Image (tube, rainbow, N blue to C red):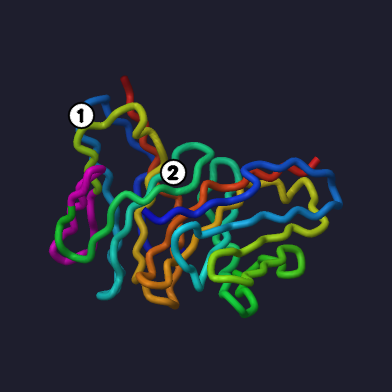
Amino acid sequence: DAKTTQPPSMDCAEGRAANLPCNHSTISGNEYVYWYRQIHSQGPQYIIHGLKNNETNEMASLIITEDRKSSTLILPHATLRDTAVYYCISYSGTSYDKVIFGPGTSLSVIP
Amino acid sequence: GAVVSQHPSWVICKSGTSVKIECRSLDFQATTMFWYRQFPKQSLMLMATSNEGSKATYEQGVEKDKFLINHASLTLSTLTVTSAHPEDSSFYICSARRTSSNEQFFGPGTRLTVL
C-alpha cells in the first residue's frame, strides 16, 4: 500500500502557483519524498525529490516540513500543460525498495 | 537524462493470443526493472519486479503463469501476456532502476487492447 496521502483533486488558475500537499507521517529516516506526474496516457514523469531540505529545480519546488511528516510541491506558474495526476511517493532508493503509487492528486489548470 | 523505451506503444490482439512487450533502458544498465498495470481512471499497480538473470517476483494476486517476465540482459526486460482476454486490456508501464544510482525511470507505456 502507498505510504502517502494526497487530496484527490485540485484546481489552479493558469499563471498562479499550484501548491500540492502530501502527508507522509510514517516516512522512515532513509526514505526520500519523490514527486512524479502523469499526463493522460503517458508514463510517469519525474519532477523532483528531497530528503529533508527544500529543493528546487527547473520544474518545481519541494518544501518538506521539519518533522518530515508532510511536504508541498509548488509549481510556481501553472500552465495548461501542467494538468495531470501528481503522485507523492516515499522511496528509499535502496535495492530492496519499490516505487508504490497511491491515487495521487488530479490537478486541473483552468484558463 | 536516463531514457526507458517500450515497444510496442500500442497493440490490439485477438482473445487467446499472446502478446510480448519490451522494456529497454537506452543509456544505462538496470539490474532491476518493474512492471506496472494501469486501468482507466486508476493509479499504477505494481505487478512484478524483474531481476536480471533470475526469476521475477510477483505481487500478490498477479498470476505468474499469465504474465511471463524475462530479464535476460541489463538493458532489456520483456512481459508476455499469455492467452490474453479482454479483461487484460490495460496500460502497461515499465520502469528501470539504474544500477549505479538506484533511481527509477519510467517508460512511456504500452496500451494493450484485447478483442
Inspect the image, locate mark 1, and give the three-letter code of the amino acid beneath it. Answer: Arg
Looking at marks 1 and 2 on the same chain, the residue that comes earlier in the sequence is marked by 1
Query: Does residue A1 appear to the left or right of A62 in the view shown?
Result: right
The residue where tag 2 is placed is A38
The residue range painted magenta reads A56-72
Task: Report in which chain the residue with disc 2 lies.
Answer: A
Inspect the image, locate mark 2, and give the three-letter code of the amino acid beneath it. Answer: Gln
Instruction: Using the numbered discs, state the Cα–Cα distance from disc 1 to disc 2 in whole angstroms.
Output: 20 Å
Numbered badge on residue A59: none
Quadrant in which the C terminus of chain A appears? top left
The residue where tag 1 is placed is A16
Position of residue A36 measured from the top left corner of the image (x, y, whole percent): 37, 50
Position of residue B61 measured from the top left corner of the image (x, y, whole percent): 66, 67
Residue at (49% x, 63% y) in the render: B96
Residue at (57% x, 75% y) in the render: B52
Could you say which quadrant of the image residue A25 lies in?
bottom left
Instruction: Name above or below for residue A77 compared with residue A4.
Output: above
Label 2 sits on a secondary structure element that is: strand
- Which residue is more in the foreground, B40 or B92? B92
Label 1 sits on a secondary structure element that is: loop
Residue at (36% x, 59% y) in the render: A89
Query: Does residue A54 appear to the left or right of A8 in the view shown?
Result: left
How would you rate the neighbour count of disc 2 (Cα within 10 Å): few for under 14, some for 14-19, many for 20 or more? some
Instruction: Name above or below for residue B73 compared with residue A16.
Output: below
Query: Does residue A86 appear to the left or right of B69 in the view shown?
Result: left
